[in-house]
Amino acid sequence: HVQTPTTVITDSLEVLNEISGKENIKKCVLGGMFDEFSHTILGNITIEQIKRYQADKTFIGVSALSEAGITTDTELDALLKIAMAQQSQRVICIATFSKFNTQLMHQSCQWSDIDCVITDKRPPANILKCIEENEVELIVVADESASADSGCLPLSN
């Protein structure tokens, strides 16, 4: 049985660096303009390129997550996240507890676009309500220094 390599499509130099040298991962890097702050590639070219792919899962790093959904500080980042969500069967958002109930200027994905939220602590009640109303899977993972009885849920494929 030959294992098909996993394909990673990324606009992040940090993700590319992390998977560099791993032979079982096919790497697709998006083009566009380099953003110094986020160390990602952004732009209209990047968004158009995303639309040529179909993905099983997309992992979206979240800058702000409120009752409005995901918001970002730049329009291009917001549009890129929307494009990624539209081209994926499953949208998984990664947000630390500090990102909940924060809001930035540009609207990105709505709660109805999100399938799963992975976070480090149980979200506040109003965010839990959004999660429940939109049937979003919630995965809470504690850092390795947390005690064994922290009540975290295991992360699985």
Image (cartoon, rainbow, N blue to C red):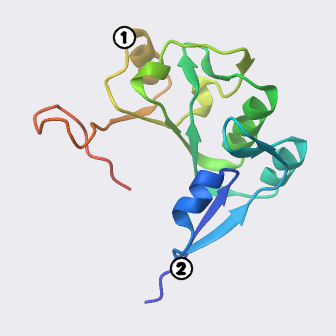
Q: Nearer the viewer, residue 35 or 117?
A: 35
Residue drawn 81% across the image and 51% down it:
51
Q: Quadrant of residue 7?
A: bottom right
Q: Quadrant of residue 39?
A: top right
Residue drawn 37% across the image and 20% down it:
123
- Image quarter where the C terminus lies is bottom left
- Image quarter where the N terminus lies is bottom left
Q: Is residue 98 above or below residue 9?
A: above
Residue 94 x %, y %: 49, 37
Extreme-bottom residue of the structure: 1
Q: Nearer the viewer, residue 20 or 65?
A: 20
Q: Are marks 1 and 2 in contact (CB under 8 Å)?
A: no
Q: Which mark is residue 125?
A: 1
Give the secondary structure at mark 1: helix
Q: Is residue 22 above or below residue 66?
A: below
Residue 133 x %, y %: 47, 19
Q: Quadrant of residue 28?
A: bottom right
Residue drawn 82% across the image and 57% down it:
52
Residue 128 relative to residue 152: left or right: right
* Mark found first going from the N terminus, 1 or 2: 2
Residue 83 x %, y %: 75, 41
Amino acid type for the residue under numbered disc 1: Ala
Residue 14 relative to residue 155: left or right: right
Residue 118 relative to residue 6: left or right: left
Amino acid type for the residue under numbered disc 2: Glu
Residue tagged by mark 2?
Answer: 23
Label 1 neighbour load within 10 Å: few <14, some 14-19, many 20+ = few
